[in-house]
Image: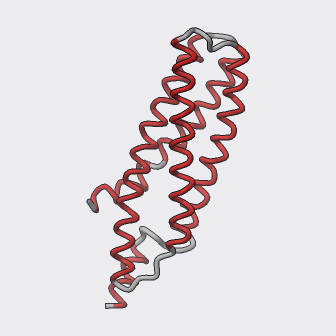
């Protein structure tokens, strides 16, 4: 499963962009009152949740690889990994719940202008979670070298 772990750094950028574009589309939809932007926001939110799921799954595989590195003598910051993982899981579940709620409201034709503004607030909160995931993930790479060749060379030097 090392292949999936290697995909993690590539996949994580998709949900970041999609969730932020979702927020922008939700704002444009509320301001312009054009249905095309509301539909685009819904589709973008759906794609964001799917790619976030892939990012979380590949992240779990990356954590598994990090555990093997720890066994090989590398210093792995598991507390920092845990914080990153917690925010990633929270972000995935938060936006998934948002998607389900929004879908129900749309299907029942109750997604009114008031709900559009409420969902903008929800999306802003979710964007904070996205920021936290990125902040913690960036720290893993740039402070601790997790997932880099530097960490791999540390393992070789310890053996």
Which quarter of the figure has residue 26?
A: top right
Number of numbered labels in the structure image: 0
Identify the residue at image location x=60%, y=47%.
130
Residue 62 at x, y percent in the picture: 38, 62
Position of 66 compared to 122: left or right? left
Tell which of 16 and 133 is nearer to you: 133
Which quarter of the figure has residue 34?
A: top right
Above-or-below relation of 89 to 15: below
Position of 10 compared to 102: left or right? left
Coloured how? secondary structure
Identify the residue at image location x=49%, y=47%.
13
Identify the residue at image location x=60%, y=37%.
20
Which quarter of the figure is the C terminus placed in?
bottom left
Residue 89 at x, y percent in the picture: 51, 50
Above-or-below relation of 150 to 82: below
Above-or-below relation of 60 to 37: below
Identify the residue at image location x=28%, y=62%.
2
Which quarter of the figure is the N terminus placed in?
bottom left
Tell which of 109 and 10 is nearer to you: 109
Residue 30 at x, y percent in the picture: 70, 18
Residue 86 at x, y percent in the picture: 54, 56
Above-or-below relation of 28 to 51: above
């Amino acid at each position: 499963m090392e292949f999936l772990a290697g995909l993690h750094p590539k996949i994580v950028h998709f949900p970041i962009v999609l969730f932020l574009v979702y927020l922008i589309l939700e704002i444009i939809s509320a301001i312009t009152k054009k249905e095309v932007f509301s539909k685009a926001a819904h589709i973008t939110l759906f794609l964001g949740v799917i790619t976030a799921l892939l990012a979380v799954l590949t992240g779990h595989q990356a954590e598994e690889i990090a555990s093997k590195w720890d066994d090989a003598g590398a210093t792995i910051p598991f507390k920092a990994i845990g914080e990153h993982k917690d925010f990633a899981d929270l972000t995935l579940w938060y936006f998934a719940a948002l998607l389900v709620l929004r879908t129900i409201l749309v299907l029942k034709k109750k997604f009114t202008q008031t709900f559009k503004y409420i969902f903008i607030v929800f999306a802003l909160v979710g964007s904070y979670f996205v920021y936290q995931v990125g902040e913690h993930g960036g720290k893993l790479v740039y402070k601790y070298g997790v997932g880099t060749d530097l960490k791999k060379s540390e393992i070789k030097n310890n053996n």
